[in-house]
């Protein structure tokens, strides 16, 4: 029986002692006492969740017909929910998928156009939604929220990831790797508390004789009192001083925590793992290839796991002749040098025109540049003709307006 299997058995028999941190964590896992807030206290998990949500939320959903984007995009895509931005709507949708494996999109009857199509879509708080089977066939589902019964496909859409046949809702990746997160949480808590509760003294006083408990307590109290200011110590015969050898790096489980970061990266599909902003060793990620790293991450994780089901769900809100695709150009944005090299290639091959480059860059090649005229010095006053004496300057103050009359 392995360590964790033993802790599981012990946890079922009764609550572990306060000194058994691992047993307490496993007991909490088995009894479902650990939840999202516990896992988000792990820095790598918080960062991974933030990364997934923020990247997908910045993408623009675009409606296409016959392979071409619509000239006027539907309202349900440009501003899906009242009082929040499209980015916040997408963030709520993706966050629900990460946290619960399911997002519930409500299209209220009051938010529909003349054709009956939804113009408003709201992400419902999953914890307040109850999903159940409509009948014993387990082929259709019904949703209850805020004392309403909502019809799936008409009033609500259920967007899921990891949903298996016969299951009501999807599976959160955090729940899927729950046991691994419990071990990582154990290491994080232990490392965080080590300096406070590690019970490792800074020095050890060794006596070659025999001391009673009371005598040892007196010696300890006297030592602490006399050396609070780190003054030098003079030891009498029979006493020896030894500095306790501790390795903070090992004590704080730095290698174990790095391994935990890698486990989080694997479980949540963060590739390359350096996107967690953790020093994992052997990293080759540089500022020059961050854009390539983001596109790799989008292709191996975001697109198949999150973007694809979101595109299908949003397409269901539009007529059957239209489909939604997320515009990933934000992830492919090049720097100045990269853009100009791409323009040179396109112009040379003839598949882009100078006018297109002007539009993409925001240039107006034929418009006059708003350059101010050069500074002209104030001309000197003309000299008075010969024989005419110039008036003496008046010492009286000029009236309002700066003119003398």
Image (cartoon, rainbow, N blue to C red):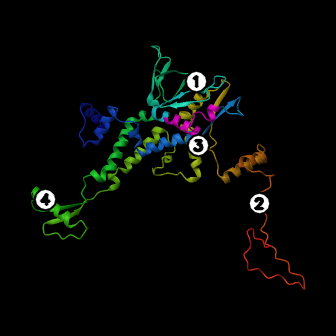
Drawn side of residue 180 relative to residue 101, left or right: left
What segment carries the magenta color? Answer: 75-95
Which is nearer the N-term, disc 3 or disc 2?
3
Which mark, residue 216? 4
Disc number for residue 109: 1
Q: Which of the numbered marks, if any, corresponds to residue 295? A: 3
- Distance from disc 3 to disc 4, alpha carbons, whole Å, reads 64 Å
Q: Quadrant of the C terminus?
A: bottom right
User: Where is 62 relative to 320, above or below?
Assistant: below
Circle 3 or circle 4, nearest the eye = 4
User: Cα distance, mark 2 to mark 1?
Assistant: 55 Å
Q: Left of 366 or right of it: where is 215?
A: left
Q: CA distance from mark 1 to mark 4?
A: 79 Å
Per the image, label 1 sits on a secondary structure element best described as: helix
Residue 349 appears at what percent x and percent y?
Answer: 77, 45
Query: Which secondary structure lies at badge 3?
Result: helix
Spot occupied by residue 404 in the image (x, y as percentages of width and height):
78, 73
Residue underneath mark 2: 371
Residue 187 locus on image (x, y percent): 34, 45
């Amino acid at each position: 029986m392995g360590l964790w299997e033993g802790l599981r058995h012990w946890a079922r028999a009764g609550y572990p002692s306060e000194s058994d941190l691992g047993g307490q964590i496993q007991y909490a896992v088995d009894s479902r006492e650990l939840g999202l807030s516990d896992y988000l206290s792990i820095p790598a998990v918080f960062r991974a969740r933030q990364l997934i949500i923020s990247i997908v939320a910045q993408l623009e959903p675009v409606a296409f017909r016959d392979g071409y984007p619509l000239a006027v995009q539907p309202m349900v895509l440009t501003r899906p929910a009242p009082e929040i931005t499209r980015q916040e709507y997408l963030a709520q949708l993706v966050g629900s998928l990460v946290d619960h494996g399911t997002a519930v999109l409500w299209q209220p009857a009051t938010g529909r156009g003349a054709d009956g199509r939804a113009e408003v879509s709201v992400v419902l708080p999953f914890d307040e939604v109850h999903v159940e089977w409509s009948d014993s066939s387990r082929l259709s589902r019904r949703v209850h929220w805020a004392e309403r019964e909502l019809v799936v496909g008409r009033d609500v859409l259920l967007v899921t990831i990891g949903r298996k046949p016969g299951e009501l809702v999807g599976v959160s990746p955090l729940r899927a790797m729950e046991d691994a997160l419990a071990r990582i949480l154990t290491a994080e808590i232990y490392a965080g508390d080590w300096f406070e509760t590690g019970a490792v003294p800074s020095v050890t006083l060794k006596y070659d004789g025999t001391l009673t408990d009371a005598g040892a307590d007196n010696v300890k109290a006297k030592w602490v009192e006399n050396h609070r200011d780190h003054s030098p110590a003079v030891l009498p015969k029979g006493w020896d001083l030894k500095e306790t050898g501790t390795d903070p790096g090992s004590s704080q489980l730095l290698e174990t925590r790095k391994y935990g970061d890698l486990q989080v990266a694997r479980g949540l599909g963060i590739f390359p793992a350096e996107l967690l902003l953790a020093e994992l060793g052997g990293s080759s990620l540089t500022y020059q290839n961050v854009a390539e790293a983001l596109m790799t991450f989008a292709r191996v994780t975001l697109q198949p796991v999150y973007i694809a089901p979101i595109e299908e769900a949003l397409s269901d809100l539009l007529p059957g002749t239209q489909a939604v695709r997320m515009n990933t150009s934000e992830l492919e944005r090049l720097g100045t040098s990269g853009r100009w090299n791409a323009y040179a290639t396109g112009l040379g091959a003839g598949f882009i025109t100078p006018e297109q480059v002007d539009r993409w860059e925001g240039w107006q090649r034929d418009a006059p540049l708003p350059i101010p005229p050069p500074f002209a010095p104030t001309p000197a006053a003309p000299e008075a003709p010969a024989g005419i004496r110039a008036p003496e300057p008046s010492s009286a103050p000029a009236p309002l307006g700066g003119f003398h009359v």
